[in-house]
Image: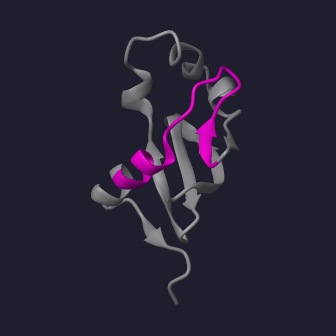
Amino acid sequence: MVDVIRIRALANYRLWLRFTDGWEGEWDLSSLLSQPGEMVIPLRDPVMFARVFIEMGAPTWPTGFDLDPINLYMQMRDAGKLTNSQAA
């Protein structure tokens, strides 16, 4: 099980995330936000997108939209987007 422990919204609908196992990286959500759906439409506003926070280990927005941290981790890992912050 892996959860998000730190998060920061970046420009152009990207997130910087650190996971409980020390791996971290940036993930681009622009393709997700370009999809139709009531839950993603409010996040197209950069001010709302920037209001991301962590709830129970998951990136979450005040609208109730959240991302599954395990799925997010696996997508980032498989895309080569993670680096180990604990590596020396």
Q: Is residue 59 magenta?
A: yes
Q: Residue at x 62, y 49 (%)?
A: 57
Q: Is residue 60 magenta?
A: yes
Q: Is residue 72 above or below residue 3?
A: above
Q: Is residue 19 above or below residue 21?
A: above
Front one among 62 and 2:
2
Front one among 13 and 64:
64
Q: Position of residue 5 (x, y in %)?
A: 65, 57
Q: Residue at x 51, y 19 (%)?
A: 40
Q: Position of residue 54 (x, y in %)?
A: 68, 44
Highlighted magenta segment, given as a residue range: 57-74
Left or right of 55? Residue 71 is left
How many numbered marks, from 0 up?
0
**Residue farthest toward the bottom in the current orientation of the protein:** 88
Q: Is residue 34 above or below residue 3?
A: above
Left or right of 76? Residue 69 is right
Q: Residue at x 54, y 45 (%)?
A: 15
Q: Is residue 29 above or below residue 35?
A: below
Q: Position of residue 29 (x, y in %)?
A: 44, 35
